[in-house]
Structure formats: C-alpha cells, structure tokens
C-alpha cells in the first residue's frame, strides 16, 4: 500500500541515524579546520620563500653591481662587505633561516 510507504518516509530519522550524522558532521568540521590551518601554513611558507628570494636577488644584484663600471663606485670595496654578503647568503640556506618566521 502506497500510503504506508509514504507514512514511513515521513517518519523522522532514528536516533541511530542522528548519531551517525553528528559523527560525520564532527569529522567534517575537524577536517575543515585542518584544511584551513594547512592553507594558512602554505601561505606563510609561500610568503617566506618570496622574501628569501627577494633577499637572495638583492645580494646577487649587489655582487653584480660591484663589478659593473656604472655602479661599482657606489658600493664599498672592502672585504668586510664581501663577508657580509657571503654571510647573508649562507644564512639564507641555513637551518636558522629555515626555522625563522616571516617577522624575523
């Protein structure tokens, strides 16, 4: 009889179905929170890599400018300046830099 089937379809979910739905919703919420946290971490890493690339690019430009005739007179000729550039370049690829935050 179709009226019986229609009536059965209109009965609210059982307690067991609500429990399963609540568990699924809780799992979904946790996964969504994890996804948001990972997206934020990815953005921080992207920004950190961008900053590191800018610093490295600047170091390379300074080294190049020291040898070009147009800009060489504007930069120090001392070994101390070379040491500074080398030290900064070394730091960019060190564990210390890897652990540093964008703010540092």
Image: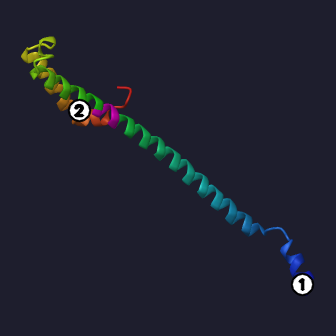
Q: Which mark is on residue 103?
A: none
- Residue 28: x percent and y percent? 60, 56
Which quadrant would residue 79 be assigned to in this image? top left
Q: Which residue is mark 1?
A: 2
What is the count of numbered marks? Answer: 2
Q: Quadrant of the N terminus?
A: bottom right
Do the CB atoms of the residues marked 2 and 1 lie less than 8 Å apart?
A: no
- Asked if the magenta segment contains residue 43, the reply would be no
The correct choice, above or below, for 12 with respect to 52 in the image is below
For the C terminus, the image quarter is: top left
For residue 92, the mark is 2
Label 1: how many Cα within 10 Å (few below 14, some 14–19, many 20+) = few
- Quadrant assignment, res 88: top left
Query: Is 47 in front, or is 9?
Result: 47
The span shown in magenta is: 49-53
Distance between the Cα atoms at labels 2 and 1? 74 Å
> Residue 3 in the image: x percent, y percent?
92, 81
Question: In which image quadrant can residue 43 be found?
Answer: top left
Q: Is residue 50 above or below residue 18?
A: above
Q: Is residue 86 left or right of residue 37?
A: left
Drawn side of residue 67 relative to residue 54, left or right? left
Q: Quick one: 32 or 17, which is closer to the camera?
A: 32
Vertical arrangement, residue 79 with respect to residue 44, above or below: above
Mark 2 lies on a secondary structure that is: helix
Q: Secondary structure at mark 1?
A: helix
Q: Residue at x 26, y 33 (%)?
A: 96
Q: From the image, give the main secondary structure of the stretch colored magenta.
A: helix
Q: Residue at x 52, y 46 (%)?
A: 36
Q: Earlier in the sequence, mark 2 or mark 1?
A: 1
Residue 18: x, y in percent? Answer: 74, 64
Side of 28 relative to 52 (left or right): right
């Amino acid at each position: 009889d179709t009226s019986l089937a229609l009536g059965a379809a209109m009965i609210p979910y059982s307690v067991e179905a609500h429990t399963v739905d609540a568990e699924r919703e809780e799992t979904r919420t946790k996964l969504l929170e994890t996804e948001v946290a990972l997206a934020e971490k990815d953005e921080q890493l992207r920004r950190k890599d961008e900053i590191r690339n800018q610093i490295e690019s600047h170091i390379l430009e300074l080294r190049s400018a020291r040898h070009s005739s147009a800009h060489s007179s504007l930069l120090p000729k001392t070994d101390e300046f070379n040491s500074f550039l080398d030290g900064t370049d070394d730091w960019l690829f060190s564990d210390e830099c890897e652990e540093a935050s964008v703010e540092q």
